[in-house]
Image (cartoon, rainbow, N blue to C red):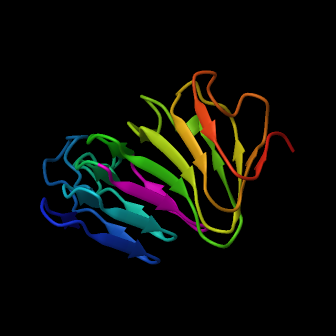
């Protein structure tokens, strides 16, 4: 699924979106992207599964999500799953933790070689409580607009990150 350049758009996924399968036998880079966002100021909300297409090698997957425009947001909600990487190649992309049901996120999944790559900012929105587990060395601006963001350990946030918040629980 592709959101082309031009007007902003929104995808709210509660089912399954899968990129096309690769056709080049033996290639590990040929699977299609699950959701490709080329537009700017768009939002992808996921509480389902978004998968990159299976590559020609029958093992690897293309990116689950690629945010190529500017000022795009990927919002995770309870039940989210990605098969493949989630990559922000455009500028000023936000990874948001939202919804009304509580959930958790492993911070070690953020980084240049990790599943979630290239995000400039991170936001807690919605009335839910999100618990962050693991650690990351990736900095970035964090904001808590609604709900509660719980850091599951002392090193959940990178030392070079900036936090603007409402309710924040530092350790559980």
Residue 58 seen in render? no
Query: Looking at the image, which is closer to me, 79 or 141?
Result: 141
| 7 sits left or right of 65 in the view | left
What percent of the width, then of the height, locates residue 83? 43, 55
Q: Quadrant of residue 113?
A: top left
Q: Which residues are magenta?
A: 71-85
Q: As displayed, is residue 7 above or below residue 165? A: below
| Most distant residue in the right direction | 172
| 103 sits left or right of 8 in the view | right
| 148 sits left or right of 70 in the view | right
What percent of the width, then of the height, locates residue 73? 39, 56
For the N terminus, the image quarter is bottom left
Q: Quadrant of residue 8?
A: bottom left
* Residue at 58 percent of width and 63 percent of height: 98
Q: Is residue 46 magenta?
A: no
Q: Is residue 72 magenta?
A: yes
For the C terminus, the image quarter is top right
């Amino acid at each position: 699924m592709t959101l082309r350049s031009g007007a902003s758009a929104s995808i709210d996924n509660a089912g399954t979106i899968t990129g096309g399968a690769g056709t080049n036998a033996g290639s590990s880079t040929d699977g299609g992207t699950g959701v490709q966002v080329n537009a700017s100021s768009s939002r992808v909300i996921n509480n389902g599964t978004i998968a990159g297409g299976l590559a020609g090698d029958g093992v690897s997957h293309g990116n689950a999500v690629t945010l190529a425009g500017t000022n795009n947001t990927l919002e995770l909600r309870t039940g989210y799953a990605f098969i493949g990487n989630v990559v922000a190649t455009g500028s000023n992309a936000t990874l948001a933790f939202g919804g009304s049901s509580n959930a958790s996120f492993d911070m070690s999944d953020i980084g240049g070689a990790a599943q979630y790559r290239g995000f400039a900012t991170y936001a807690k929105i919605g009335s839910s409580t999100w618990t962050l587990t693991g650690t990351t060395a990736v900095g970035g601006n964090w904001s808590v607009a609604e709900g509660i963001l719980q850091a599951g350990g002392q090193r959940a946030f990178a030392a070079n990150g900036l936090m603007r918040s409402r309710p924040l629980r530092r350790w559980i």
